């Protein structure tokens, strides 16, 4: 199963976290073994652009958009057999020590588990 792992920068990061793994080691250990298949850093929220269509008109809005203190700094797509393994992979990431990680399972189109797909 694939999981989107959002890498979050948080304002409450410890000043001097101990024993933080090196990102190079995490990348090697996950990408070289096929447990991660895609990932990258993201530009800051000020560089974001929002796109909406209302009454047939395309509306483009410059970021940032939310009043949150956490910032999505990057992402990885994990390929893990189950949530427990995805959690183990995430827990080894340096941002688990200095920020936060959010795991979201992919929900392939056509799979209906009783949750409405329309907003």
Image: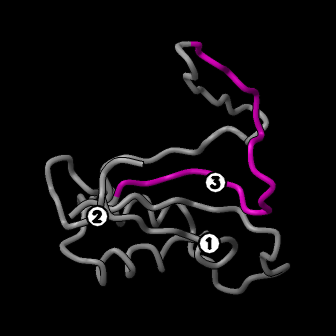
User: How far is the residue under mark 3 from the one under mark 2?
Assistant: 26 Å
* Magenta stretch contains residue 60: yes
Q: Which residues are magenta?
A: 57-77
Q: Residue at x 21, y 67 (%)?
A: 114
User: How far is the residue under mark 2 from the one under mark 1?
Assistant: 27 Å
- Sequence order check, earlier mark of 1 and 3: 3
Q: Is residue 26 left or right of residue 33?
A: right
Q: Is residue 8 above or below residue 18?
A: above
Q: Residue at x 40, y 64 (%)?
A: 104
Q: According to the image, label 1 marks what residue?
A: 100
Q: Is residue 103 above or below residue 2?
A: below
Q: Secondary structure at mark 3?
A: strand
* Residue 12 in picture, x, y percent from top left: 81, 76
Q: Residue at x 30, y 51 (%)?
A: 117
Farthest-out residue, right: 15
* Magenta stretch contains residue 89: no
């Amino acid at each position: 199963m694939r999981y989107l792992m959002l890498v979050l920068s948080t304002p409450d990061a410890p000043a001097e976290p101990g024993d933080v793994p090196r990102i190079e080691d995490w990348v090697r250990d996950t990408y070289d073994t096929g447990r991660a298949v895609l990932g990258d850093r993201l530009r800051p929220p000020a560089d974001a652009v929002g796109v909406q269509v209302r009454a047939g008109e395309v509306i483009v809005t410059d970021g940032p958009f939310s009043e949150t203190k956490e910032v999505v700094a990057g992402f990885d797509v994990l390929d893990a057999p189950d949530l427990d393994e995805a959690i183990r992979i995430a827990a080894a990431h340096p941002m688990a020590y200095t920020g936060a990680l959010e795991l979201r399972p992919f929900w392939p189109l056509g799979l209906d588990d009783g949750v409405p797909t329309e907003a």
